[in-house]
Image: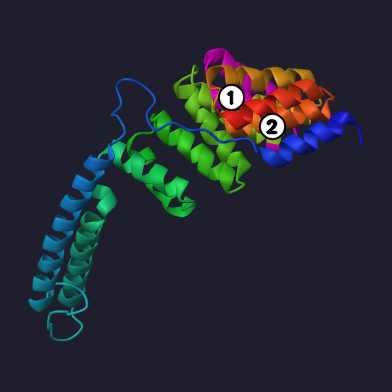
Amino acid sequence: MSSAENAENGVDKLHSYQVYYIITNNNNEPEPVPEENLQTITVAVDSELTRKRRRIEALRMQGQVPGVPQQVQGGSPQSAAVAAAQQQQQNAIAVKMDPANQLSSAGLLELAHREYQAVDYENAERHCMQLWRQESNNTGVLLLLSSIHFQCRRLDKSAQFSTLAIKQNPLLAEAYSNLGNVYKERGQLQEALENYRHAVRLKPDFIDGYINLAAALVAARDMEQAVQAYVTALQYNPDLYCVRSDLGNLLKALGRLDEAKQMAVSQMRV
């Protein structure tokens, strides 16, 4: 096996390229909700739910909620109309009782973000789509949807939402990086490299962009450029243990043992 193949195998085993997204995208959008504010929102929502549950129970006792229908003689049209009105009332109450509907846009996106981190992609997508229907130009939502679909192996959908984010903000580096991930997964390395390089040009301190670029360069057997991409990432954050590990293995596979040893020593100091 050649040194290039050793390098590619070593790096791919230790580092899978990342999917990046942001919670807010520009100055006129709300900031992510801090932890303490989310707790306050949760308490308020719980209180509201308790009030609504009591209201539903009262309606049931009055025979105004489906499940305890009013006594209407015969199968008259009036009976059907009453049943339809009751169903509509119950549906409206159910919508209001959904805790997600009580959150602000930033709070809802933060909730989806937490669900994404917890690998609850179904609920993360559901809440993102709920917000996207309200704010179709929210690039934070578009990026998160792109990441969710990527993790679920829905590459066409992932590319679609990355492209929508780019249309909303052509300077959004994270969207190009996400699109590069799709191309890399499809084996279209040239297109992946173009998007990663464009991402780091737009945002020179974009660490994830350099990591993604390095992984694609290894796959393209351009090892020297991959080394440079890792080195650049470490210039912005020297404490990235995984990047140091990948770079050390790459240097070792290339036969640059002294540099690999230095990298190993520096890892012990981190």
Please state which of residues 86 and 43 is positioned toward the viewer in this rendering.
Answer: 43
Between tags 1 and 2, which lies in front?
A: 2
- Location of residue 173 in the rendering, given as x and y in whole percent from the top left corner: 52, 21
Quadrant placement of the C terminus: top right
Residue that numbered label 2 is attached to: 246
Residue 266 is left or right of residue 53, and the answer is: right
- Location of residue 225 in the rendering, given as x and y in whole percent from the top left corner: 74, 18
Whether 27 is drawn above or below 218: the answer is: above
Residue drawn at (28%, 41%) of the image: 35
Q: Quadrant of residue 1?
A: top right
Residue that numbered label 1 is attached to: 209
Label 1 SS: helix
Point out which mark residue 121 bears.
Answer: none
Please state the extent of the stretch shown in magenta in the rendering. Answer: 185-211
- Location of residue 121 in the rendering, given as x and y in whole percent from the top left corner: 48, 51
Q: What residue type is labelled 1?
A: Gly
Q: Does the magenta stretch include residue 1?
A: no
Whether 133 is drawn above or below 253: the answer is: below
Q: In which quarter of the image is residue 7?
A: top right
Please state which of residues 242 and 153 is positioned toward the viewer in this rendering.
Answer: 242
Q: Would residue 217 be seen by someone viewing this image from the given angle?
A: no
Q: What residue type is labelled 2?
A: Asp
